[in-house]
Image: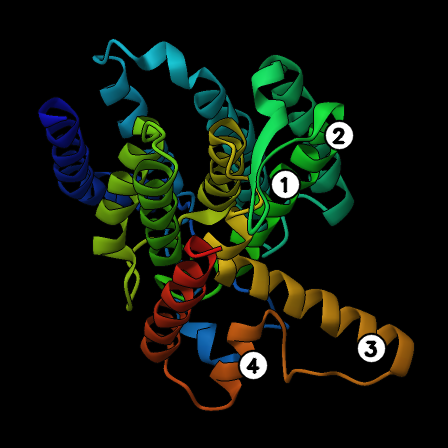
């Protein structure tokens, strides 16, 4: 345990120390974010902020894990951030090259995520994964049905974190609090071992948040958001907590639902439910400051997460 705490501390310190150099490098490469035209007018000043910052908080925890004897246990987690981080980096790179907010087209990104999920689940295939904890009902054997459920979980979680990454600090802070609640649940309620790689990644994200809290000096980009979402899902699957992720990652779920509701309502009724989706933009247009949205989202995340832990 002492060694793991030191690894967490080392990851956090290295991330904080190295981000200024990384940000400087991104600026020299003109690797800046282009803001979507349909986004809030309030975001115009963010154009040009270095993006793909997720590369560093993926790399440092992975390197720290190399010095740990248990690293072989976390192969699936490492592969998830490599595969989905690569998809996100391609998207970020194309956005910079095209000088446009959109890199990969929506269907292209989904196809790559689907392929990535199939690869991950094929490599993870193990009867142990078929047993998952179900809120209220407890331990349940899903048999082979766990694989389509896990597939939806991986693709859904990666997109959910991506949708949430729309204002400074929102996705990062909610990732950290989700990890904290998941590992608290795993250790204290179910007596499971904590996921060291997931915890080290949360340390890397904390270091990133030193520079991503408003006004952000760097964005995680799709490189970071897709990787973090996939990592959350893969870790939850491996620990048997996939269904609990709905509660522990409630803000990511609510952000995704807001988009689904908005699109469905407009297609069926030609009316919008929210001023803009994802829902954090709705509150921005209502006059809430970004810091207020982030802070209140964390309170709501804790409320729903604690409810989930009790089920």
Cα separation between marks 3 and 4 = 15 Å
Q: Closer to us: mark 1 or mark 4?
A: 1
Residue nearest the observer in this picture, 96 or 240: 240
Q: Is residue 249 visible?
A: no
Q: Return the residue found at the far front.
A: 137
SS under mark 2: helix
Disc 4 secondary structure class:
helix
Report the disc number at residue 73. Answer: none
Determine the CA span between mark 2 and mark 3.
33 Å
x and y percentages locating residue 241 in the rendered image: 50, 39
Q: Is 4 left, or right, of 199 in this rendering?
A: left
Q: Which residue is mark 1?
A: 153
Determine the CA span between mark 3 and mark 1: 26 Å
Give the number of the mark in front: 2 or 3: 2
Of the image marks 3 and 4, the number of the one nearer the N terminus: 3
Q: Position of residue 267 (x, y in %)?
A: 87, 73
């Amino acid at each position: 345990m002492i060694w793991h705490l030191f690894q967490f501390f080392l990851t956090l310190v290295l991330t904080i120390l190295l981000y200024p150099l990384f940000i400087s490098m991104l600026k020299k490469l003109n690797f800046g974010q282009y803001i979507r035209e349909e986004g809030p007018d309030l975001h115009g000043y963010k154009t040009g902020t270095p993006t793909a910052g997720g590369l560093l908080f993926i790399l440092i925890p992975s390197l720290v894990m190399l010095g740990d004897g248990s690293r072989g246990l976390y192969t699936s987690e490492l592969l998830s951030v490599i595969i989905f981080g690569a998809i996100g980096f391609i998207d970020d790179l194309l956005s910079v090259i095209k000088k446009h907010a959109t890199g990969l087209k929506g269907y292209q990104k989904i196809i790559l995520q689907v392929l990535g999920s199939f690869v991950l689940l094929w490599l993870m295939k193990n009867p142990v994964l078929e047993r998952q904890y179900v809120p209220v009902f407890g331990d349940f054997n899903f048999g082979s049905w766990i694989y389509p459920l896990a597939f939806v979980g991986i693709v859904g979680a990666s997109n959910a974190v991506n949708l949430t990454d729309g204002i400074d600090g929102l996705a990062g802070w909610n990732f950290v609090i989700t990890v904290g609640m998941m590992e608290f649940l795993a250790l204290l309620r179910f007596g499971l071992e904590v996921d060291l790689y997931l915890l080290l990644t949360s340390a890397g994200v904390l270091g990133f948040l030193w520079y991503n809290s408003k006004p952000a000096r760097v964005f995680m980009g799709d490189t970071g958001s897709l990787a973090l979402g996939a990592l959350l899902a893969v870790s939850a699957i491996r620990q048997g907590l996939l269904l609990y992720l709905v509660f522990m990652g409630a803000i990511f779920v609510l952000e995704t639902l807001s988009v689904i509701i908005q699109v469905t309502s407009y297609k069926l009724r030609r009316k919008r439910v929210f001023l803009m989706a994802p829902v954090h933009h709705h509150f921005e247009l209502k006059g809430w400051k970004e810091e207020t949205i982030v802070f209140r989202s964390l309170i709501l995340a804790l409320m729903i997460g604690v409810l989930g832990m009790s089920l």
